[in-house]
Image: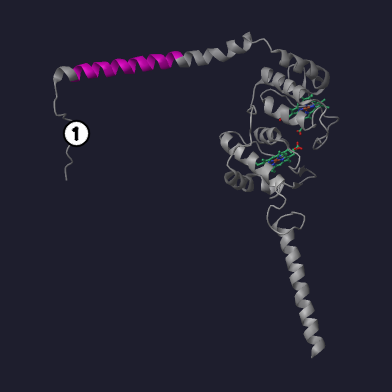
Amino acid sequence: MTKPTAAEPADPSPGLLARARRRASSTIALTVALGAVGFGYAAIAPSSAAADQTPSADAQRGQQIYQTACITCHGRNLQGVPDRGPSLIGVGEAATYFQVATGRMPAAAQGSQIPAKPPQYTEEQVNQIAGYVQSVGGGPQVPSGNLRDGDMALGGELFRLNCAQCHNFAGKGGALSSGKSAPGLGTSTDQVIYAAMLSGPENMPVFGDNNITPAEKRAIVSYVQTLKETKDPGGNGVGRLGPVPESIVLWVAGIGALMFAVLWIGAKS
Ligand code: HEC
Ligand code: HEC
């Protein structure tokens, strides 16, 4: 079987063809040239832009707070202090927002898992500190605006796949190995949930945007927040502890009924 080729157009005027070819090759040349300029610019632009940037007023206020509350453990240039605190270069606004908004930072002392406490700063100050850390070290950022507009069904699926093994199916939290624990998500705000995924505190993995896309993160936020608002997320009301305790309750009740039946039959005969 030979396939008819579409190489010969109906009207192969040689002049037209040559002109078209010439036009095509100059377009390619132009694209290549533009591409080269673009890459060249991208290679030098970030360093010069960073050097020119003067910090905004907010970042300056953030810097003042940083210098009083964080510098002893994280260092003057976010580089970290041995045996006190890790480097904050590259952790970004997301991790800083997470740590300060949940009161984990400033840490009172070293520990295996620094506890969440009532936050020490207002929302505005938290954003200023986070903005400062971002401006110096760069890193992942939490998007602004409404984060709760995602697809609920998708969010539920992703939550069960990625989060439930540590935080429980109903977001109640649970114990992990070596004395650590995954907290309940009952009081976490939208921004904290999003920032937790981006920064992966303690034993929690980092869920980068290649792994869970921003749209999927919003779906998870929507799901977690709706789960909390719903009185009964399904299953039997055994403290929402998950399928295992629920089946234990069923099992105990079932065995009890069986024993009762056995004893009753025994007594009758
Ligand atoms: C007493 C020492 C101490 C002070 C003060 C302190 N930190 Fe920390 N910080 C730590 C330690 C230790 C860790 C590592 C915690 C962990 O692994 O769970 C940490 C972790 C962090 C992280 C997470 C880094 C990452 O890799 O995700 C951020 C962000 C952070 N601190 C910001 C701050 C900010 C902002 C302040 C000031 C408001 C502050 N810290 C004050 C000791 C401190
Ligand atoms: C391997 C276990 C693990 C997995 C999986 C995990 N987490 Fe976590 N998560 C943790 C631990 C541990 C902490 C506490 C970190 C700390 O105290 O610094 C935490 C903290 C959080 C917090 C902060 C709660 C608060 O308000 O203090 C949120 C929100 C959260 N996780 C959401 C999620 C979401 C959403 C997922 C799934 C995409 C997820 N986690 C997957 C272990 C896990």
Residue 144 vs residue 111: left or right?
left
Task: Report helix, strand or loop for mark 1.
Answer: loop
Q: Quadrant of residue 154?
A: top right
Relative to 228, residue 19 above or below: above
Q: Where in the figure is residue 150, as x and y percent of width and height?
A: 59, 39
Q: Quadrant of the N terminus?
A: top left
Residue at the image position 79 percent from the left and 15 percent from the top:
64
Residue 155 vs residue 179: left or right?
left
Relative to 140, residue 19 above or below: above
Residue 80 in view of the camera? no
The boundaries of the magenta stretch are 17-37
- Is 21 a magenta residue? yes
Report the image quarter containing ligand 1: top right
Q: Where in the figure is residue 31, as x and y percent of width and height?
A: 37, 17
Relative to 246, residue 75 above or below: above
**Residue beneath label 1, please?**
6
Instruction: Give the colour scheme shown.
Output: one colour
Residue 51 vs residue 36: left or right?
right
Q: Residues within 10 Å of mark 1 (few under 14, many from 20)?
A: few
Q: Where in the figure is residue 213, as x and y percent of width and height?
A: 56, 36
Q: Where in the figure is residue 97, as x and y percent of width and height?
A: 72, 28
Q: Quadrant of the C terminus?
A: bottom right
Q: Quadrant of residue 203?
A: top right
Residue 44 in view of the camera? yes
- Is 124 a magenta residue? no
Secondary structure character of the magenta stretch overall: helix
Instruction: Please state which of residues 189 and 48 is positioned toward the viewer in this rendering.
Output: 189
Q: Quadrant of residue 137?
A: top right
Query: Tag count in the figure?
Result: 1
